[in-house]
Each structure stands twice: as structure tokens, then as C-alpha cells.
Image (cartoon, grey):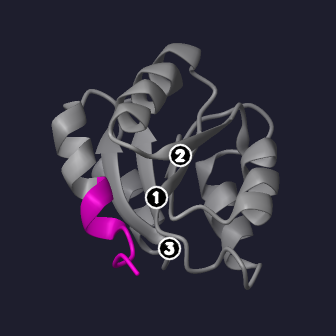
Amino acid sequence: MPQMLIIDDNVEFRTMVSDYFTDLGFAVEIANDGREGLSKAKLIKPDIILCDVMMPDIGGIEVIRGLQTDDDTRAIPVLVITGTFFDKDMSDLFRQESNCREFMSKTVELSYLQKKVEALLPPKK
């Protein structure tokens, strides 16, 4: 069963995404902010992380960079999803980070998000 960590301070969004992926057979953990997300990532070592950009305490770019400092979390693919208007410069900033594999808007259809997530999962053993 693939394991996903959702790091997002928006309750409605993370609940909707969590329910959707749980129904698909994922084990989903939730973190309310970046600091909690880093702690949970180190603890559970998920197969994939969905991370918001703008969060209280520490934001998405700090989360991504924090994951890269730990050997256990460095290779976890991160899919960045933002609810704020994003421009190409913000997308480019995130894409410079080796573990940021996708950058998209929260308005994306869940079926499209599912395809992106499944493409980033490690092969089944």
C-alpha cells in the first residue's frame, strides 16, 4: 500500500485529497504545517509528499530543502500544490530543487493529480 504525506494548512483541501487517495488504497498521513510535515516525513518515510507553498511557520520551499538535508527523506518525491496565484518564477524556483517533481494549482482535477502521483511512485516490489 503506497504511503502519502499531505502537508497543507487548508483543512478542506487536505481532507478532500486525503479521502480521495484513501479510497484508492493509499495510507495517508496529514500534517497541518511545514514543521509538522518535516517531522512526520522523517518518522514515516512516505512514498510521496504533497506540499502546499504558503503555510504558517515554515513554507513549502523550506520543507523541500529540509527534506533534502536528511538521507532518509532526500529522495522522496514532492508534488507541490498551491492555492495562491503562482507565476513561472515561483514554479521555476521550486523546480530547481531535486526532490520537487511537479508544481501545480489546487484547482487541478483529482483524476489528473492521481495520474501525476502514480507516475512518481516507486515501482511495486
Q: Nearer the viewer, residue 49 or 61?
A: 49
Other residues around mark 3 within 10 Å, as few (<14) / some (14–19) / many (≥20) = many
Q: Is residue 13 left or right of residue 113?
A: right
Helix, strand or loop under label 3: loop
Q: Is residue 77 above or below residue 90?
A: below
Horizontal placement of 66 versus 94: left or right?
Answer: right
**For mark 1, what is the residue?**
2
Provide the residue span drawn in magenta. 117-125
Residue indicated by mark 2:
27
Front-most of residues 27 and 102: 27
Residue at the spot 61% in from the left edge and 63% down from the top edge: 64
| Earlier-in-chain disc, 2 versus 1 | 1
Which residue occupies the foreground of this view, 103 or 115?
Answer: 115
> Would you say residue 2 sits in the magenta stretch?
no
Q: Are marks 1 and 3 in contact (CB under 8 Å)?
A: no
SS at circle 1: loop
Mark 3 = which residue?
Answer: 99
